[in-house]
Image (cartoon, grey):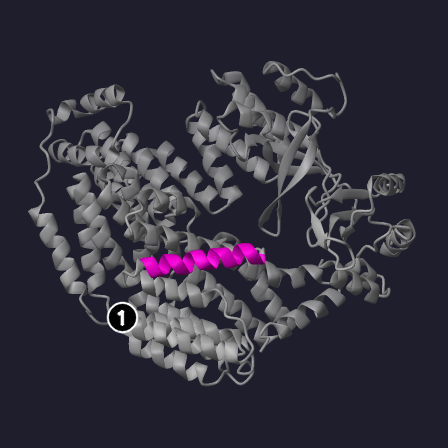
Amino acid sequence: MDIWNWVEKLQDDLGEAGQPQSAQLLTRLTDDVCELRMDRVDALLPEARALGKTLGNPWLDVFVGHWEMRNRVGNRVEGESALGDAVALFERAHRADTAECPQSVCVTQDLAACYGNIDGPGWVPERVEVCEETLSRVDPSWACFQCLSCEKADALLDDGRADEALTYLDVQAAAVLAHGGTVYDSFPETRIKILLASGRAAEALALIEQRESEVAAEGNYEPANCTVPRRLSKAWALAQLGRDEEALASLVPFGQLSPNYRRMWAHVVALLVRASPERNSWDLGSRLNATLAHFSDVGAHRFVIEIAGLCVEMALQRGAGWVARRHLALARRHLGQLRQDRGAARQVADMAARIDAAPAAAALPVPAAELLDWLAAQGEANQSRDPEREAEWLLQGVAERPDDAALVDTAASALSACGAEDDAIALLWAFVERHPEEDAQPAYSLMRLLTQRGDEAGLLRLVRHYEATVPVFALWCQAQLARRLSDWAALEQAVTALLALSPGSHGARGMLASSYLVAKRFEEAAQHYRHLTEVLEEPRSAHWDHMTAASAARDWPAVRHSAAAIGMELESTDGPVEENFGWVIIRCMDGGEPIEYYARRTGPVTARIIENAPANRTQRVDDWVVFDAELVHPAPEDEAEREHFMPTYAEVHTLESGGYASSWLIDGVDPGEAAWNAFTEAVEARGWKLWKHSRDDYQLTDPDTEGGHLPGVLFTLAQPQDQPPLALHRFLVEATAAWTHPMCWLRLAEACNQDAQRHLEVIERYGL
């Protein structure tokens, strides 16, 4: 059964009703979940929920809820934190008005997966029961049949029945094939998982390599939720087989992982460092600590104990006993949250025994009063620092000298670098509470950490602690809290009061100026940045910020003043600064999502966008924009790579709109250089914007052509907002009439109520 049919019909209806962006919203939501773009999903959810309410469509509520759970329970591996919402969604999906919605079946997978995240072995009977009950209501033609079968197999694996799980997958896959269906990636992925968990690495690797060959032969695009687990599984199989270098090559970088794949990543690196201890570094420990902290925050209780066991082993191998003890304490906290023990208490006892058997912490190498200087000298000699090793000494030093601000601050910094932020914050609070009349460096470090983690209650507590004794610092905290809440009026009030008490606080003035930029109070922002250019010893950065604010305020003499101050030569001497500074990329925000466009830089911090927006995006072509001079992506260190580097800047303000309507997509066989040049000249003569999106190697299929392939061209056209789309449709009909192969502009034809059949035929013939 095509469970997506009703969604596609809804999207078609929305498009015909003039709501193409609403139609695309659902596709963007599902794509972002599959591509592991978790924050983008979060940004889309409010709009998606609002669409369901606007349309009064309860099926859409279930659909959106399911994909929210795929992001939370799937990508973020949430357990206890998502259980209430997963249960509520399950109940909502089985009411009378949604019981027939195909996605009401999908929410069973969400609930079963949530139980599995909390305590997989402890919830096995319930997971199996809920899967079997739902499977009894669908047949193998449903895509859900495969998802639910994999959920049940996963439960059997957690119950120690790996062979039974493999046999069950065979039976279910045969049922799918018998119904004329296709076995999707979830089946081989689950089989590989079971084999790896059972120590059958060679069999798993053979299956992985078979799937790699199939994917290469098919040539189809695969989303990240297919490629990432396959790469990690391959790394784990290779590591189990002792092929470490190959495992490292296949290992996905930690920064590219969503939380649901960090568990497998931890198992791989545990094997690799067991064989090669030199790979076991403090920064590896900090990444694993972040994994543990996440599992703890979301209530994935058994995963905490499982990964803590690996982390304790690696911490002891590094000689970081204090880290191992932290992991043990966390595992003990979660032990009591399990539904069934199933060997967990023994795991925790084994961790404790290993820690007890480890050597005692090394004594301070020098007296506590001399420790900071000694560590600095060691760092210079070795050209590197190991905060994990230093932290143990620093904590000993703090125990002897608890009122040494520099020692406390350095210890907190080391703890934070190792991922022990809770410990760092506790250490800083202890110091701050003993020194209510002193805003020493630990107070500023505490404010920074609280701000980074968005601890609004902590910042308020810090404000109250200092407002009577150190009002300037209390106002700093108020300003940080206001910026966190995007409360620009409160920020202005706090910083203005701070500057009245401390006029020389350049950081406060810069914060006020940046808030004025956000609030589009550009003249006031420019005044404060101008002041900073006059008082700072190193004013270059302030000059760039000043040019951004002044450009947005159209104060071109001020722009020229700062440009001259930093040695930038401008050709013009008066009027708007609009010159040719070469190519750049401008990052804009569209519906909460970043999207980047090629642009021509026209001044120090201004550019004109020259790339058409995609058909489903707000049009930005020919917009004249102001940007922030700080690079979005740093320039590469390699000199050869820098030669081809194009800088990307974030838009701050639109000075002028280009005045163009949405883009229309045209796709088809490349007509050849002469025909294409004539076409582009005709487009330009009409004042329309054309942007070619396809690369030179873009190929289309054609069964009527020898070889079966032809060069393709994919481009968009945009008209001024006051021109009717029908004029563009008629132009395309005439301009391409003599081309050997017909082109496709289906959406434009539909919008103009013109015959769509010829475009559908083009799509079918050329595989568009």
Q: Disc 1 marks which amino acid?
A: Pro
Foreground of the two, 598 or 428:
598
Above or below, comparing residue 581 to residue 160 in the picture: above
Q: Quadrant of residue 439?
A: top left
Q: Where is residue 422 shown, x and y percent of the image?
A: 27, 46
Taking the spot 62% from the left edge, 71% from the top edge, the residue there is: 7
Q: Residue at x 89, y 39 (%)?
A: 685
Q: Position of residue 358 (x, y in %)?
A: 9, 44
Prevailing secondary structure of the magenta residues: helix
Question: Does dot 1 land on a helix, a strand or a loop?
Answer: helix
Task: Indicate left or right for 357 with 2 as reference.
Answer: left
Start and end of the magenta stretch?
202-218
Quadrant of the rendered image containing residue 629: top right
Residue 741 in picture, x, y percent from top left: 83, 54
Mark 1 nearby-residue class (10 Å; few <14, some 14–19, many ≥20): many
Indicate left or right for 690 with 256 as reference.
right
* Residue bearing mark 1: 121
Give the percent coordinates (x, y) of residue 570: 70, 17
Relative height, residue 434 to residue 72 (above, below): above
Task: Name the residue at 13% across, 57% down.
Answer: 350
Task: Tell me: 355 left or right of 544.
Answer: left
**Does the magenta-highlighted stretch encompass residue 26?**
no
Residue situated in front as seen by the camera: 638 or 118: 638
> Is there any visible trace of residue 419 in the rendered image?
no
Asked whether residue 353 appears in the rendered view, the answer is yes
Quadrant location of the C terminus? bottom right
Relative to residue 586, is residue 217 depicted above or below? below
Quick check: 135 above or below 80? below
